[in-house]
Image: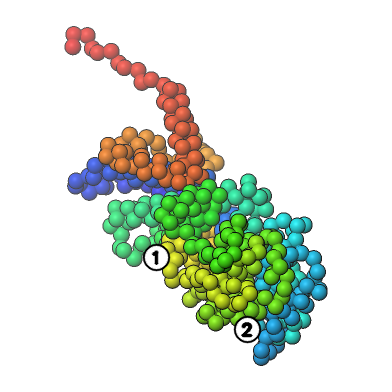
Amino acid sequence: MSVTELPGDRAPDSSTTPAGPVRPARRSAAVALLTRLHFYAGVLVAPFLLVAALTGLAYTLTPQLDDALYGDKLTVSTVGGQPRPLAEQIAAARAAHPDGTLTEVQPGDGDRTTRVVFARDDLGDRQHTVYVDPYTARVSGGLTTWFGSTPATTWLDDLHRNLHLGAVGRHYSEIAASWLWVLALGGVVLWWRRRAAGRSRARHLLVPDLSAARGVRRTRGWHATTGVWLAVGLLFLSATGLTWSRYAGANFGAGLDALRARTPEISTALAGAPPATGGGEHQHGGAATATATDPATYDRVLGGARAAGLSGPVAITPPGEAGAAWTVAQTDDRWPVGYDRVAVDPATGTVTARSDFADWPVLAKLSKLGIQAHMGRLFGPVNQILLAALALGLLCVVVWGYRMWWQRRPTRADRRAPLGAPPARGAVRGLRWWALLVGVPVVVALGWALPWFGGPLLGFLIIDAVVGLRQRRRRPAVPVSPAPAGS
């Protein structure tokens, strides 16, 4: 949400206001401060939210887009009985595409083709994936992929994350995620206070008041009510988006490390073998080992993993160094997910270590599931529909916010202005001392954890203070009439 009630809304005239106790002005100072923050953050951050919503909406269509563009490679025309041995499928992939280092194999499951992944120096962080019909060992084709994503999905993913501008472009998405939760929570609080002050029925918290006059009041009703409906989803998108952002994501990762809540590593050490030097798991582009070049090893390793209970789609990854176990990991992103992993001795097919998703730390589980839901994978088409609804709703909320700003502009001949006036400054001076004592450290901590929240907020406060000081200095002094003689 971007804009809510601003000074200049038609306030009730004192002559028509019923007599009664008036709430202290200090209570309204917090509301005035939140209103000003909500207004300026909405006006300045809304363009980033618009882009994030549009690109995110496009990304929700990637499963259907992949099927339309690459269906002949990703799926088989006829599901057969028993799949051919992986060795035969890998040999066919290697014959059709002889370049590159074999780094991973994902056996075909159901109507899905087998994916044979090769690392190539000329592709950088991309891979070359060859698709093989698991029932006939016929090569369906090949694509340049990014950790399993097709070219179309990779293009849309880059568009959503960084606008194809690399590391610089990632700032835009982090700004959007860093401020989205502030705008959503602030808008809900302001809408609740407005309804409570107006003694409106509770249903108007969830249904716009269509009896309001046309203009800013009706627009605000649609803006705020839609925002209330979207609030939980927007908070979710903000939190999950921040977990893999550039700066806030690094702080989140450091927090997971401090709490020992990272995804557990799985040991690939083999008894009697020298310790590997490259860490627990092989990454794309690692060196090939002698066993990795033997396609028959993949069948042996897969057999050991299946015997250990790893069902569904899996990825088989050879180690980067000789004398280490292979890793087989479940890759089922649909709920109920499958993320169990085992380490397998390639010589015997014996499982040497195991890491089950059920044993992961709670934060690691929530982070993994949250990312999959954010990407629209966790609940399949239902997940996609919910994300699309959130994106469309956010677009409407932002447009209505800017419309209110336009509708609030002065139109009288002596007070014409191109845009609406911002809320009045000075609310901080009306806050209670304890509110400042508690609020300032909290905001500082949030600004440190979320740099693209803290930095712009500090900049706004400095600029706002400078502008306010200059305006006070320019304000003409009110002449004081001399006291009557003899008084």
In the picture shown, does residue 75 fall above or below 293? below
Sequence-wise first label, 2 or 1: 2
On the question of residue 176 being in view, the answer is: no
x, y percent for residue 48? 56, 50
Q: Which picture quadrant has residue 303?
A: bottom right
Q: Position of residue 171 (x, y in %)?
A: 58, 47
Outermost residue, front direction? 272
Q: Which amino acid does label 2 sit on?
A: Gly
* Residue 257 x %, y %: 46, 53
Quadrant containing the C terminus in the rendered view: top left
Query: Mark 2 against mark 1, which lies toward the viewer?
Result: 2
> Mark 2 Cα within 10 Å, few/some/many (few <14, many 20+)?
some
Task: Give the alpha-carbon distance from disc 2 to disc 1, as whole Å.
Answer: 46 Å
Which element type, helix, strand or loop, lies under badge 2? Answer: loop
Q: What residue did someone put label 2 on?
A: 110
Front position in the image: 428 or 82: 82
Q: Nearer the viewer, residue 357 or 252?
A: 357
- Identify the residue at horizontal 46%, vertical 29% (top origin): 466
* Residue at x 48% of width, y 63% of height: 264
Q: Which mark identifies residue 207? A: 1
